[in-house]
Image: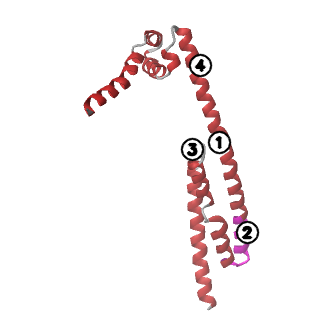
Amino acid sequence: MARPVATLIFAMVITPALAIANSPVINATCAALTPQLYEYCVGVLSADPAATNATDAHGLATAAVNITADKAAATLQVITYLISELNTCQDIYARMEEGLANVLTDIRDGRFKSAMLEMDVNVTGSPNGGCDIMLFEGNAQKDPISEENTQNDLWASLADAILETIERNVSKRGT
């Protein structure tokens, strides 16, 4: 019983693919293009119902333009998401920059413990890592500043480790 059902399902799945692959309009139109574009042309147009139902090159051109318009709209949406998410990252880094200015003031004034706490709260609490996560898990699901986020995280961790060392040494001398 399972074998006839599997065969029937396979036939239902493969039949449209065979019909699509044999679309004479797609094959003829794509064959008229450069050889480098033929495989791509057949592949993308065969996957589009409007293109497979086209009766001539004008119908294929219309389908190709509609596919391109859909892709452009999707790209625009990704850009819109990225702008929004990058604006949030900009806010994160602006707060980080302010925190680092406070850390520098504390270091200049010899307040190493305060500097270390400021680093822990406002800098090494992975604000840039939060930016990475937001970009990867956000609507755009792309992180165009991944390398910069990683470098900033490494530098912040290094600065924090140095401050912790200074604070330990100051604490030892003070007790």
In the rendering, which numbered label is found on residue 65? Answer: 4
Q: What secondary structure is marked by label 1?
A: helix
Dot in front, 4 or 3: 4
Three-letter amino acid code of the residue under disc 2: Asn
State the residue lying farthest toward the front: 1
Residue range (magenta): 99-112
Which is more N-terminal, label 4 or label 1? 4
Q: Quadrant of the N terminus?
A: top left
Query: On screen, 153 above or below 49?
Result: below
Mark 4–mark 3 contact, CB under 8 Å? Answer: no
Residue at disc 2, secondary structure:
helix
Q: In the image shown, does 34 or 67 lie closer to the viewer?
A: 67
**Disc on the earlier residue, 2 or 1:** 1
Question: Magenta span: helix, strand or loop, mainly?
Answer: helix
10 Å crowding of disc 3: few (<14), some (14-19), many (20+): some
For label 1, the crowd category at 10 Å Cα-Cα, with few meaning under 14, some 14 to 19 and many 20 or more, is: some
Q: How far across and down, in percent of the image, does residue 81 sit?
A: 65, 42
Amino acid tagged 3: Lys
Is 154 or 82 nearer to us in this picture?
82
User: Picture coordinates of residue 114 (x, y %)?
Assistant: 69, 76
